Image (tube, rainbow, N blue to C red):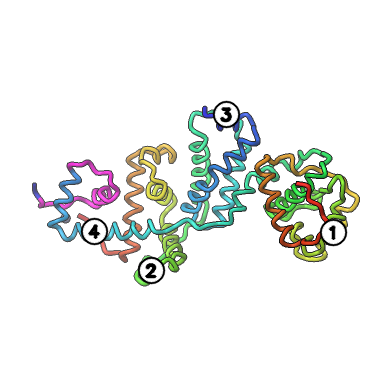
Amino acid sequence: MDELGRRLAEGDEEAFTEVVERFSRQVFALCYRVLRDTEEAKDMVQEVFTRVYLKRESFKGRASVYTWIYRIALNLCFTHLKRRKAETIPIEDVAYRLAVDADGPDSRLEELRGIVGRMIEALPPRQRMVFVLRFYEKMSFKEIAEVMKTSVGSAKASYHFAIKHLRQLVSGGENLEA
Amino acid sequence: MKHDYHPDSDELIDLVDGVLEEERRRWILEHLKVCSQCSAYVRSLEATLDMLARDEVPQIEPAFFTYLATRIRAQVQKPTWRRVLLAPGLAAAAIAALLVFVLYAPSPPELDQLDLIMADMTTQELIESMGDDLGYEVLASDTSEELFSMEEYFQGETAYDLLEGLSPLERQHLVEEIEKILQSETSGSNIHWGC
Ligand SMILES: [Zn+2]
């Protein structure tokens, strides 16, 4: 077990503070990517580190502290997503807005964020998680399979579905099936 | 090398994702040179992913991260604060802890969670000497009634240490934060901040 993990597991308050300082931004980024809502992501970060605080003495050091926290965050986000009522967005709506707004200077960053948010929100929970982990978090399919408790093949299939879905949103539904 | 059949869309995604085996990758790249259908598909994939890649995580206020550990402890450890007499020098930090606790409590705090008074100065006196405006700021109260009820509540109470759960680093953050507020708003104040 690394030094920080050992101190955390022993209940050292300083270690907890250090863990929060070191990892909370990354956890926020992950939660935001998955949830696409700043306030929800902040609440989720607080929830994640509250769990870390309450469970710290059960940390066994089999993985690094970060991996442990990351898994807690993923599980909470995934559970949250599945509970959230799924909304469907008409493809034409997103496609039209994309045609109008897709490329623009920095001032359009907010707009882009909104569009990307709508696209990602159009994905069902599992596809959405896998897409975020692969595309934004740069995880391997093996790692994704481990944290999502699934097979490499099925993680990859979810990613492919997600990409096809997203591409369809952008190109308005035209299709290629070889 | 034959081009009489197309790679399927999964393979084209793998190509863009960079996970194809080298030999297959080369075959598909050759295919793309002569197949407008597949190359259009790849271009649309790339355009989609380029756009998704330009999306950034929004910046949020740094204080959210700075006080996160403090808020979590405050939430979890509420009932276990022990009564400690504060050294005069810790007054600023204690007020800062109160400020942070009030500002970041997940729900409006109960007044009985706020019974903080300096060992050498009552919070009542402290608020009075700060003036109403700063009192609002420090106690995060929105209305004069609210501030008044807090002042009333504080009157005559004894000191509790909200700092117990704070690390030295957090204390330092808190003290710096509160000192910024105080410097900008109490020039000429008679409060002596010993930190
Ligand atoms: Zn082709």
Q: Chain of mark 2?
A: A
Q: Which residue is mark 3?
A: A6
Residue visible at 22% across and 41% down in the picture: B21
Question: In the drawing, does residue A79 fall left or right of residue B110?
Answer: left
Residue visible at 57% across and 39% down in the picture: A19
Do the residues at discs 1 and 3 belong to one chain? no
Residue A108, percent across and down?
A: 43, 68
Query: Start and end of the magenta stretch?
Result: B3-23
Task: Point out the tag, 1 or 4, that comes first from the N-terminus.
Answer: 4
Q: Which residue is mark 2?
A: A104
Residue at mark 2 to residue at mark 4: CA–CA distance: 23 Å
Q: Respond yes or no on whether mark 3 lies under 8 Å from ligand 1.
A: no
SS for tag 4? helix
Residue B2, percent across and down?
A: 9, 49
SS for tag 3? helix
Crowding at mark 2 (Cα within 10 Å: few <14, some 14-19, many 20+): few
Do the residues at discs 2 and 3 belong to one chain? yes
Do the residues at discs 2 and 1 belong to one chain? no
Q: Nearer the viewer, mark 1 or mark 3?
A: 1
SS for tag 1? helix
